[in-house]
Amino acid sequence: MYAMGQTREALIEATKHLLAEDGYGSTSPRDILARSGAGQGSLYHHFRGKSDLAAAALHEVSAEMRTAVDDRLDAAADPVVAVLDWLQAPRDALRGCRLGRLAAEPAIGEAVIAAPIAAYFHHVQGRLAARLGEAAAAGRLTDGMDPGEVAASLVAVVQGGYVLARATDDPAAMRRAQAGAAALLRACCRPVEGDNR
Amino acid sequence: MYAMGQTREALIEATKHLLAEDGYGSTSPRDILARSGAGQGSLYHHFRGKSDLAAAALHEVSAEMRTAVDDRLDAAADPVVAVLDWLQAPRDALRGCRLGRLAAEPAIGEAVIAAPIAAYFHHVQGRLAARLGEAAAAGRLTDGMDPGEVAASLVAVVQGGYVLARATDDPAAMRRAQAGAAALLRACCRPVEGDNR
DNA sequence: GTCTATAATGGGATAGAC
DNA sequence: GTCTATCCCATTATAGAC
């Protein structure tokens, strides 16, 4: 039959949406089956259980988000512009980060769940550090600034922005955190593109 | 009413510890009763239910953490030193913030749970903004920098540091985020004589 | 491969004796 | 106020027909 893998894909797709909306602990096999339209046995035919299915879904989400980061960070030739662009991108603050929100859950202790999430954070920190390194090499960064540490702080600002927005039920909290970090970063970067010898 | 509070206090104390360790969704009334040593009916005698008890526990945690913030931010006369001191305080990164970690849970939608958490974040942002405002008034902050936005970004760095540390199972992720933010902040503040924090 | 039926466990709350 | 006993329901997973 041509429709091979149809049910499996439907299960993964439903899981991706439910994990984004409710997190891991609050997403039950029943919810997944209802949303995907699959029958009871199908989940356990295609996957070992809930965590195995969630791992498959998170693997896809992680890949999507790494691609999105690459697209944004490669869009501008100027590294400082690219980093500021990534930092200030609009984000659905009240929904939370599809991967980062799982860090608070006990399920992060399961290696199969943690792996795709950690892969994303390592990737985004590495890519930011690389572009900040370009800026540093061009003498555009204040002396003594470590690109890896600055990258970590910027990723943290975004993840913390989600936390603040959800905790105070206010999407503007994310925008304030982004704006503050952008101002700090601008203050320690030379603003002009080009040769600074 | 005399002799009041022994069992009630034990229930709240047990709940504070369990919320810090496991979050809200994974803390069950059974766990609370086992840890507190109270019998089954006591929880529902003293509280309306799980969320009511959790609210009481979070109210206490929020007050404790606001006091801790005040102590740190008032310790140094110099506002920039005080803010850097707060930012770089050692934190138990893998355990997560006792309040911030709940922001990712569905329970944050319940007003009684969200209120003490939001109160903490509003407090710490307000106190940081006040001290950064002192620095700005003294001409110690780069022009055009908004104290409220910088405060939001610093709180976000800490919350995001917890997320990164847990997601990558690496406490050093928190320290890198803190160090990066401290470097950014120092770069936009006029140097403090005799102090290298 | 997919379905219906159902088991086993634990979460959250209540009843009522003492 | 505190205890024991119990209820109802959701979660996660399995069994076995088709």
Image (cartoon, coloured by chain):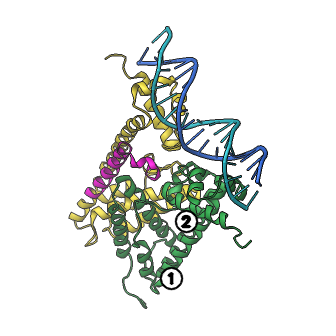
Chain colours: A green, B yellow, C cyan, D blue
Position of the N terminus of chain A, as image quadrant, is: bottom right
Q: Is residue B151 magenta?
A: no
Q: Residues within 10 Å of mark 1 (few under 14, many from 20)?
A: some
Q: Where residue B135 sits in the image (x, y, percent)?
A: 26, 62
As rendered, which of A155 and A71 lies closer to the eye? Answer: A71
Q: Residue at x 63, y 58 (%)?
A: A38
Disc number at residue A121?
2
Left or right, A156 with respect to A61, comes to left
Q: Residue at x 35, y 45 (%)?
A: B111
Residue designated by label 1: A74
* Residue A137 visible in the snapshot: no
Q: Where residue C15 sits in the image (x, y, percent)?
A: 47, 20
Classify residue A196 by image quadrant: bottom left
Q: Is residue B36 above or below residue A150?
A: above
Of helix, strand and loop, which one carries label 2?
helix
Disc number at residue B181?
none
What amino acid is found at the position of numbered circle 1 in the picture? Asp
Magenta-drawn stretch, dominant element (helix, strand or loop): helix
Chain-order first, disc 2 or disc 1: 1
* Residue B102 visible in the snapshot: yes
Q: Chain of mark 2?
A: A
As rendered, which of A40 and A122 lies closer to the eye? Answer: A40
What amino acid is found at the position of numbered circle 2 in the picture? Phe
Classify residue A81 by image quadrant: bottom left
Q: Chain of mark 1?
A: A
Q: Is residue A110 above or below residue A120?
A: above
Q: Where residue A16 sits in the image (x, y, percent)?
A: 56, 62
Q: Which portion, as a residue range, is magenta?
A: B102-130
Left or right, B30 with respect to B147, comes to right
As rendered, which of B5 and A184 lies closer to the eye? Answer: B5
Of helix, strand and loop, which one carries label 1?
helix
In the displayed orientation, state which residue is furthest to the left.
B137
